């Protein structure tokens, strides 16, 4: 049994996330977690809400609520939606937790002791109309690198270049829209990433199996232009983790907080501590996942995220871990994703464009969305959601291939042989061929899942559903029953067992439908079918089953047209 640690990029607290956010981190992480649990491994799957920084303050102000109250409310909303999509987190925490406060301050203290933090007096934009400094995303303007006119003060969403607010051309305040800005002096702490550059590069170079997308982004930040830069880790904000050196006051940093991108990844560790607290467990329970001197040396750690988050997870967070000099667990494999676009444009939380997670669940159950998103995951390139493609995928893959097989087999058996697994007849050459092909396909499917090739895994799973349909079509028990009822019984006995196997294999992708299939087969045996021949006799003759309700309904042309109009890309 392996020990698998999985973290999904933690979503910002500022509102409900869209489908692009979901498929870029949380959903494929859940797929991988479910698969590894199904294989008998010990899994810790962690996520949280990212509650600090300018997006939280701006969203709270827009909602007319105190930022702490807004974050608490939105954490509950996001947790409920995550449950709706069946995201199987072991814990869904909060970056504003006391655990994260203490751990972030601890890391800052250790980095300071190691000489890896320097104090810098810098020029920062101050809004005269807003009476405050404008760090990060309180400022928008034109990117000096690519010319994108809505670049943020910390990063351009278009070209992913890391920026400082003073880099922007024609900047304006995102609070008031004011261009009445001036540059003033303020002091901040910087993480001396440049001094860790060689160590970071050697670590990245050691990851020979990482996706090209991940390593190319990391290398770009290491080598482009002037190369890796030291990074500010404090901000002039009211909401956040107060700057401290461990548990000591940091002279000159009073009233400042740590930058959200410093504390947010540390929440992965803190969230696991939150999990232990919630379970009433001692610190050793979470430390065995994170400290290599306390048991984490045999943990394999996987991160899932969109490509815009890669620089912080391949450079800044590892710099924090390595620089601390303490035996914390570093990521072993970083699975990154490109963007999912929406009907010819981009999804955007801040601009309210696209289908959002709550809207999706109001239309159809989560399995419909899980299947489409995972089977179209933007792995090697950006992908695009269109309503036409969504309709075709649901109707053909889920309704016609999987749902139709389950319905045909169970209804036919009830009509001809009753509500128990038929006992007569023996498996013949057709069944032997199916079992052999199924064995090969399951191995291919497992290989794709283990290497986190999401789209390939979905294609292999669909192929497994297809060979069941092809067997039924060729065997034709509804015809054979007229001349050789015992032979037809053997066919149906195998097919009912096939449904149980499909439930097990499909559960990582479509957990609700899988549970429905398993319940209809009157079983709770979720043992992975390593021995396919044995799995095809797991439901013995005489075992009771039932006909499940229709697993998946088809999407009509009228519905598709209606949704396309209703969700034209603007959410007020």
Image (spheres, helix red, strand yellow):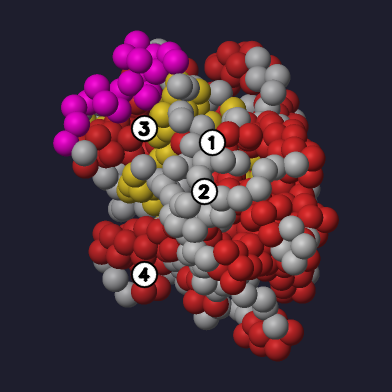
Q: Could you say which quadrant of the image residue 453 lies in?
A: top right
Looking at the rendered image, the disc whose residue lies closer to the viewer, 3 or 2, is 2
Q: Can you tell which mark lies on residue 528?
A: 1
- Which comes sooner in the sequence, label 4 or label 2? 4
Q: Is residue 545 above or below residue 336?
A: below
Q: Are marks 2 and 1 in contact (CB under 8 Å)?
A: no
Question: Which residue has dot 2 on it?
Answer: 541
Q: Crowdedness of circle 2 by 10 Å Cα count: few (<14), some, many (20+)?
A: some
Q: Report helix, strand or loop for mark 3.
A: helix
Camera-side residue of 60 and 492 = 492
Quadrant of the image containing the N terminus: top left
Look at discs 3 and 1 and give the one toward the viewer: 1
| Displayed quadrant of residue 398 | bottom right
For label 4, the residue is: 61
The reply to whether dot 3 and dot 2 touch (C-beta < 8 Å) is no
Q: Is residue 206 above or below residue 367?
A: above
Secondary-structure class at tag 2? loop
Q: Residue at x 43, y 39 (%)?
A: 45
Chain-order first, disc 2 or disc 1: 1
Q: Which residue is mark 3?
A: 269
Measure the alpha-carbon separation of dots 3 and 2.
Answer: 50 Å
Residue 288 in percent (x, y) is at: 33, 21
What distance separates the C-alpha of mark 3 from that of mark 1?
31 Å
Q: CA distance from mark 2 to mark 1?
A: 21 Å
Q: Which residues are magenta?
A: 280-298
Label pair 3/1, CB-CB below 8 angstroms? no
Q: Secondary structure at mark 1?
A: loop
């Amino acid at each position: 049994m392996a020990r698998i640690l999985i973290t999904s990029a933690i979503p910002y607290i500022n509102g409900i996330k869209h489908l692009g956010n979901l498929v870029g981190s949380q959903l494929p992480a859940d797929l991988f977690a479910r698969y590894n649990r199904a294989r008998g491994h010990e899994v810790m799957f962690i996520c949280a809400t990212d509650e600090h920084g300018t997006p939280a303050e701006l969203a709270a102000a827009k909602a007319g609520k105190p930022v702490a109250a807004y974050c608490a409310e939105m954490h509950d909303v996001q947790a409920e939606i995550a449950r709706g999509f069946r995201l199987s987190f072991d814990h869904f925490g909060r970056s504003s937790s006391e655990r994260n406060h203490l751990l972030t301050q601890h890391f800052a203290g250790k980095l300071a002791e190691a000489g890896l933090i320097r104090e810098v007096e810098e020029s920062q934009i101050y809004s005269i109309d807003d009476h405050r400094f404008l760090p990060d995303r309180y400022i928008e303007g034109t990117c000096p690198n690519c010319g994108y006119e809505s670049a943020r003060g910390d990063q351009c969403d278009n070209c992913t270049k890391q920026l400082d607010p003073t880099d922007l051309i024609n900047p304006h305040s995102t609070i008031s829209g004011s261009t009445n800005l001036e540059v003033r002096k303020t002091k901040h702490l910087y993480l001396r990433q440049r001094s860790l550059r060689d160590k970071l590069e050697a670590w990245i170079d050691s990851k020979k199996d990482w996706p090209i997308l991940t390593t190319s982004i990391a290398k770009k930040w290491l080598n482009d232009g002037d190369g890796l830069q030291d990074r500010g880790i404090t901000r002039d904000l009211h909401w956040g983790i107060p700057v401290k050196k461990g548990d000591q006051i940091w002279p000159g940093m009073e009233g400042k907080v740590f930058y959200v991108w410093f504390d947010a990844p540390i929440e992965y560790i803190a969230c696991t501590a939150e999990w232990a607290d919630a379970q009433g467990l001692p610190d050793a329970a979470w430390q065995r996942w994170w400290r290599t001197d306390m048991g984490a040396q045999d943990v394999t750690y996987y991160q899932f995220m969109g490509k815009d988050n890669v620089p912080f997870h391949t450079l800044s967070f590892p710099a924090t871990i390595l620089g601390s000099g303490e035996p914390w667990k570093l990521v072993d494999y970083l699975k990154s994703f490109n963007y999912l676009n929406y009907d010819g444009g981009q999804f955007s939380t801040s601009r309210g464009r696209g289908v959002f997670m709550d809207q999706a669940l109001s239309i159809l159950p989560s399995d419909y969305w899980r299947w489409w998103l995972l089977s179209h995951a933007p792995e090697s390139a950006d992908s695009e959601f269109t309503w036409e493609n969504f309709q075709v995928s649901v109707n053909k893959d889920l309704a016609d291939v999987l749902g139709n097989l389950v319905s045909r087999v169970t209804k036919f058996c009830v009509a001809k042989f009753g509500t128990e697994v038929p006992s007569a007849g023996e498996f013949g050459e057709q069944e032997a061929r199916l079992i052999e092909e199924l064995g090969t396909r399951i191995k291919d499917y497992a290989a794709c899942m283990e290497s986190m090739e999401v789209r390939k895994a979905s294609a292999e799973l669909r192929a497994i559903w297809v060979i069941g349909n092809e067997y039924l079509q060729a065997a034709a028990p509804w015809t054979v029953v007229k001349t050789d009822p015992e032979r037809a019984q053997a066919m149906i006995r195998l097919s009912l067992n096939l449904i149980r196997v499909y439930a097990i294999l499909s559960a990582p992708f479509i957990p609700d439908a899988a549970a429905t299939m398993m319940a209809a087969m009157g079983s709770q045996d979720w043992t992975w079918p390593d021995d396919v021949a044995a799995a095809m006799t797991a439901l013995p003759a005489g075992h009771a089953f039932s006909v499940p309700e229709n697993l998946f309904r088809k999407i009509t042309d009228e519905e598709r047209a209606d949704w396309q109009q209703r969700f034209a890309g603007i959410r007020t």
